[in-house]
Amino acid sequence: MRKTALILATLLAPLAVAQPAMALTQEDLLQAQLLPGWQLEDGHHMAGLSLALAPGWKTYWRSPGEAGIPPQFDWSGSQNVKAVHVHWPSPVVFHTNGMQTVGYDGAVVLPLEVVPEVPGQPVVLRAHVDMGICKDICLPAEVLVSAELIAPGLDQGGIRAALKARPKTAAQAGVGRVSCVVEPIADGLRVTASVEIAAQSGQEAVVVEPSDRAIWVGEAVTTRNEGMLISVADMVAPSGTPFALDRSGLRLTVLGGQRAVQIDGCPAP
């Protein structure tokens, strides 16, 4: 697809330019640590992935924007682990060369809720994370960390603070009416989301995420009309044709200032 090819070219071009002049190693730019954390009342375990970046460098959120590199997690080397749920703190918006990306700069802790296969038995969490880090150029990074998760454990490195920094829910933010108009375009769908929400501090942006991660989503064009935030985004499926959209699985994240707002589901008007 033309759009997919353009995205790949945008991501790979800085890497190709950077390779001959590369002087820094990943260790110079990124330090990673798995924080063991503590056991929750339901038998799950709250751990954390601590990422510290060199000054001026950033990494990406779960939905990084057209020019971002989404992190990929592999937990397969773990012991007694059924599932791992990443709790994302509110990200910030970056603008580079006229393109919007979403992520974190400086340092971030990603809380990890670990579900054991057998509650009460020892848990060893091993994370293999492929991610991108960017400044003037973008580089691929590979993180390999592990830790034994021992009960009861304790908070380390700001896991609780990162949990508190997650986006507010629609109810917490006082969100009113929410609706989405969906119309077909040549190679997919165009979604126009209308959200009744108080103005956020700073420049507002909306990230639109379908439940199917294989669907490409363009940068949303966001405007205000009185008390409504209006965002328009194009979606392209691998088929390159219009498709059925699961409205209940659609997620809108409103970014602005220091805290985001997450809205789950977007019904028809």
Image (tube, rainbow, N blue to C red):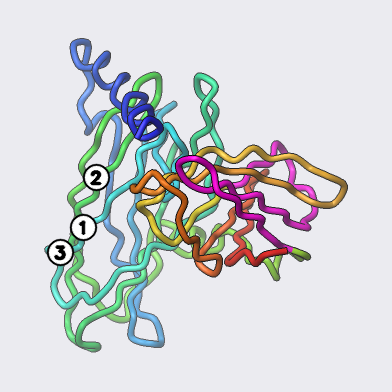
Q: Quadrant of the C terminus?
A: bottom right
On residue 74, the disc is 1
Q: Which residue is mark 3?
A: 76
Q: Earlier in the sequence, mark 1 or mark 2?
A: 1
Q: Amino acid at mark 1?
A: Asp
Q: Write the residue at 55% across / 41% down.
A: 92
Residue 123 in the image: x percent, y percent?
Answer: 19, 76
Q: Is residue 215 above or below residue 81?
A: above
- Left or right of 70 on screen, residue 261: right
The question of residue 197 being in magenta is answered with yes
- Left or right of 69 on screen, residue 264: right
Marks 3 and 1: CB-CB under 8 Å? Answer: yes
Q: Amino acid at mark 3?
A: Ser
In depth, the one of 268 and 205 nearer the eye is 268
Q: Is residue 224 above or below residue 249?
A: above
Q: Secondary structure at mark 3?
A: loop
Q: Quadrant of the N terminus?
A: top left
Q: Secondary structure at mark 1?
A: strand
In depth, the one of 117 and 1 nearer the eye is 1
- The residue carrying pointer 3 sits among few (fewer than 14), some (14 to 19) or many (20 or more) residues within 10 Å by Cα, namely few
Magenta: main secondary structure: strand
- Left or right of 37 on screen, residue 196: right
Disc 1 from disc 2: Cα separation: 9 Å
Quadrant assignment, res 107: top left
Q: Which residue is mark 2?
A: 130
